Image: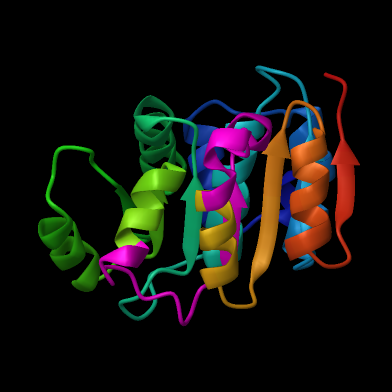
Amino acid sequence: MFKDKLHPHLVSSLSAAEIVNPTEIQKVSIPKIKSGANVLCIAPEKSGKTSSIVINVIQRLDRELNDVPRAIILVENDERGLEMVELFKMLGSNTNLRVYCVKPKVSMQKQKEIIYFGMDIVIGTSKQINDLFSFNAININDLKMFIIDDADLVIKSERIVVINRIATSIPKSQQILFAKVETDKISRFIEKYMENVVIVESIV
């Protein structure tokens, strides 16, 4: 039943990766995200939140299109970003989706050129994505999905100004948060920037 909801190329990649049974958060999040709703997904550590993000983005975007990003994903740190890229490579092996993780030691000019030549998904920390915006290095006119992984860690007081700047720059698009718990800062972010939010939760 789970795989009946997915594109055949994604089913093939999951099978190749020996991912047979979905986690609880995958089962509850995929139908809601597939519907296009703004979603807050709550699940504990090691419950499959990151793989849920990757599956949902591949499912929604499906294939390469145009030259501008259609998904931006905020992550807690560079390590998480690189892990997510590897997961995209594995589960998106049957697609031509282009994924880029912002690199801390590469100049903004160079990264602007890389993104300019065509990228479907851009991953980075809040500071990195904000720097791209400030440098006019990313075109978000066709953005479809804005996602924050580990939102309880990313949306913190010392970063809230940067997060708010990004959120106000994002055009109307599907917004998705994944977190271990719903913090006060997440609640305020939802109230300010996300309409008609659907909350899905898993305890495993």
Residue at image point 53% right, 66% down: 61
Q: Which region shows up in magenta?
A: 133-161
Q: Quadrant of residue 59?
A: bottom right
| Image quadrant containing the N terminus | top right
Residue at image point 15% right, 38% down: 105
Q: Quadrant of residue 175?
A: bottom right
- Which residue occupies the foreground of this view, 69 or 94? 69
- Which residue occupies the foreground of this view, 195 or 52? 195
Count the numbered circles shown. 0
From this viewpoint, is residue 94 visible?
no
Residue at image point 28% right, 72% down: 136
- Which residue occupies the foreground of this view, 131 or 199? 131
Residue 198 percent coordinates (x, y): 88, 55
- Which residue occupies the foreground of this view, 30 or 173? 173
Up/down of 124 relative to 17, above or below: below
Left or right: 200 in relation to 3: right
| Image quadrant containing the C terminus | top right
Left or right: 116 in relation to 32: left
Q: Is residue 10 magenta?
A: no
Q: Is residue 156 magenta?
A: yes
Residue 154 percent coordinates (x, y): 57, 36
Left or right: 18 in relation to 84: right
